[in-house]
Image (cartoon, helix red, strand yellow):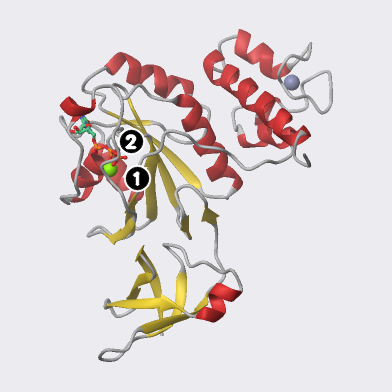
Amino acid sequence: MQGIILKGIGSFYYVLDDAGAVHQVRAQRKLRRERLKPRIGDRVEITPGEGEEDGWIHGILPRRNALVRPPVANIDVVVIVAAAAAPLPDLMMVDRLLLNARRSHIDALLAITKCDLDEGLADDIVNQYRGAACDPVKVSAVTGEGVDALRERLSGRVHALAGQSGAGKSTLINALYGLTLETGDLSRKIDRGKNTTRSCELIPVSCGGMVLDTPGFSLLETDVFDPVEIKDSYPEFAPLEGGCFFQPCYHASEPRCAVRDAVRAGEIDPKRHERYVELLNDMRQRWRERYD
Ligand SMILES: Nc1nc2c(ncn2[C@@H]2O[C@H](COP(=O)(O)OP(=O)(O)OP(=O)(O)O)[C@@H](O)[C@H]2O)c(=O)[nH]1
Ligand SMILES: [Mg+2]
Ligand SMILES: [Zn+2]
């Protein structure tokens, strides 16, 4: 029998079979020996338990894609959530999440929450990401702005929400799907999130598809890879590739660089480019030190 892993608690996994039943199962020792750790979203081959006997996962079907943070497989979209209010949005984290999604071949959407609190900041963020192929959308769980539009774009798709603690991921899911996930109390958090959501669970939703709420994080590392590849994950650079004097060009400090010209001309947001250079320099250093 086959099914999808909805969540894992301790050594148990909860698997939704194609008939809609959920089975509590464990991973066979064989998988553990092969260092194959089942993930939420994995399609697995199971033998359900009977009576007192535990059921087992004895195979993981090939993954279409996988993310490390949040730890999930086979999703269609990662919804990156950033607040236009407290906790102050960490756009470097947004950039890293975008980069990770792109490198894992997963679509990304940027949801800017709490736009009822600071429309100006929300617009500024939309502007920074307008060329980044993540369709920034302003939403508010308070006024309902953007919620229907976002739901429409996610319908029928498996999506995971990711972002800082307190950004409003659980609140947004509740607004989208009429759920009652636990949310944090803003008045007690003041500017910094406290982790309200502590576990991940894939939830089938009424309009088709599934949603995964995830615990917020405050730090996000990217894998180490050749820094020259970072620019390939910046869609706003793509039409300008080939227009630079140096080839390849990192679009960082080289003279006669088409990307830097576009930044100066206001076609690419300078803050997004500035963070790109920071990310690039960070990767260059980690790439040099990779064998240390
Ligand atoms: N004004 C306003 N407040 C919001 C909005 N969305 C969320 N909040 C508040 O932000 C606080 C944090 O929301 P959560 O949904 O718990 O945030 P989270 O991203 O799930 O946080 P973690 O589970 O810790 O990662 C709560 O007090 C919400 O009421 C919004 O659109 N507008
Ligand atoms: Mg939450
Ligand atoms: Zn360049």
Residue neighbourhood size for the residue with mark 1, other residues' Cα within 10 Å, grouped as few (<14), some (14–19), many (≥20): many
Q: Position of residue 147 (x, y in %)?
A: 24, 39
Q: Give the numbered dot on residue 91.
A: none
Q: Secondary structure at mark 1?
A: loop
User: In the picture provided, is 122 more to the left or to the right than 263?
Assistant: left
In this view, 203 is above or below 122: below
User: In the picture provided, is 163 more to the left or to the right than 228?
Assistant: left
The residue to which callout 2 is attached is 165
In this view, 218 is above or below 32: above
* Residue 168 showing in the rendered view: yes
Q: Is mark 2 within 8 Å of ligand 1?
A: yes
Q: Quadrant of ligand 1?
A: top left
Residue neighbourhood size for the residue with mark 2, other residues' Cα within 10 Å, grouped as few (<14), some (14–19), many (≥20): many
In space, the residues marked 2 and 1 are separated at their CA atoms by 7 Å
**Toward the viewer: 289 or 147?**
289
Q: Give the numbered dot on residue 215.
A: 1
* Residue 148 showing in the rendered view: no
Q: Quadrant of residue 35?
A: bottom right
**Residue at image point 27% right, 17% down:** 119
Q: Secondary structure at mark 2?
A: loop
Name the residue type under label 2. Answer: Ser
Q: Is mark 1 within 8 Å of ligand 1?
A: yes
Q: Quadrant of residue 80?
A: top left
Q: Quadrant of the C terminus?
A: top right
Name the residue type under label 1. Answer: Pro
**Residue at image point 22% right, 60% down:** 206
Q: Position of residue 124 (x, y in %)?
A: 40, 17
**Toward the viewer: 39 or 81?**
39
Q: Quadrant of residue 251?
A: top right
Q: Position of residue 26 (x, y in %)?
A: 40, 77
Q: Quadrant of the N terminus?
A: bottom left
- Marks 2 and 1 close (CB-CB < 8 Å): yes
